[in-house]
Image (cartoon, rainbow, N blue to C red):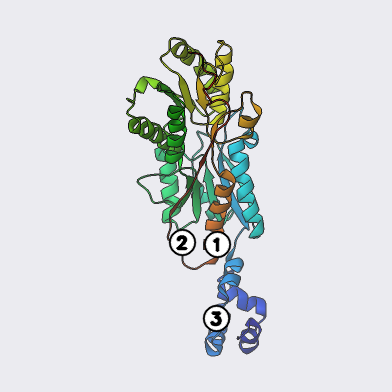
Amino acid sequence: MISRKEVAKLAGVSEATVSRVLNNVGPMKEETRARVLQAAAELGYVPNALAQQFARRKSGNIGVILPFVPKVHLFSTYYFSEILSGIGETAKRCGYDLLLIFREPDDSRDYAKLFRTQKIDACIVLGSQNVPEERSALVELKEGGFPFCLVNQRFEEEEFLSVDADHVAGSEAAVRHLIEQGSLRIAFVNGPAQYSNSTDRLEGYRNALEKAGIKYETQHVYVGNYSRKSGYELAERLAKEIQIGRIDAVFAANDRMAIGLMQGLREHGLEASQHYALIGYDDSDGSRIISPRLSTVAVPFYEMGKLAAARLLNAERASAPSELRQEVLPVSLVQRETSDRKNKHH
């Protein structure tokens, strides 16, 4: 193997100069550049691809774009803390630091600027929404050749690198379980439609009903915003439906809404597993602590974070980008007390 040292010796320059020429970094006299390239060619010197990647690295940061939600402590939410822990572990292992970038709802979404100003070398977008401003910001990244990955969000019409979970199968399993437990009038509390996982869960809910021969009714679908408060606020409407027997079970698109709903329904004298069955989604810490314990769907958020970072950082090191654009990880149903209707009063 020819070393950089030998190239430097033949060209009559320092090793640092050879490095700068081969990585095209910094200002350089044309004559020096030509001399180094000539020496490298004569000796048949092939730079190590990995060393080149590291030399070209501008910031050593992997950026994580997060939504800024007033009054919500993002890092205390199970979803974000798990994904970030996964990203952080892989980044550290690959010698990168994390740079967190908070996106205010009304901010301009100039993600490409983060690359142009050399703040980051790759970027992961969390809480991405299917709205025109977001889509055009991501298209700009893709067209600029900037490495980025979406977590828990897909855009059907655009082929962006993404890591997701199988939310269609997850919600289908949840609703099927409620049906198997004897529930036939199942309400669904979903999140906003601009998230692909909300659309996926609605699809899973419909699939399960259809396969069981139960008619899908739009009035049984409620929409919250994934916060505990939004679940709590829907309790009043759902309480009436449960009391008159129009609803006997609820599937909520995340645990926080399920827990809020459970607390609100309790104020109306309705207890989960006694007066109605309930399943949440995420398998968050809260689902294990609340009483009765919440049945839910476990999502591998930590693994999704690890995988998203690995896809980006390994692609940084490999010359050929990975072919698989969209990875979908499996989820699993966790049966606890709230979906057990054995003590249902007829």
Q: Helix or strand or loop: what does disc 3 sit on?
A: loop
Dot 3: few (<14), some (14–19), or many (≥20) neighbours within 10 Å? few
Disc 1 marks which amino acid? Asn
Question: In the rendered image, which quarter contains the N terminus?
Answer: bottom right
Q: Position of residue 292 (x, y in %)?
A: 61, 23
**Residue position for label 3:** 46
Question: Residue 10 lies in what quarter of the image?
Answer: bottom right
Q: Helix or strand or loop: what does disc 2 sit on?
A: loop
**Residue position for label 1:** 314
Asked if disc 2 and disc 1 are in contact, CB closer than 8 Å, the reply is yes
**Residue position for label 2:** 322
Q: Of label 1 and label 3, which has the lower sequence position? A: 3
User: Residue at coordinates 39% horizontally, 51% vertically from top-left?
Assistant: 159
* Depth order, front residue of 259/207: 207
Q: Is residue 1 above or below residue 247?
A: below
User: Residue at coordinates 60% horizontally, 61% vertically from top-left?
Assistant: 58
Q: Of label 2 and label 3, which has the lower sequence position? A: 3
* Depth order, front residue of 66/90: 90
Residue 293 at least partly seen: yes
Dot 1: few (<14), some (14–19), or many (≥20) neighbours within 10 Å? few
Q: CA distance from mark 2 to mark 3?
A: 24 Å
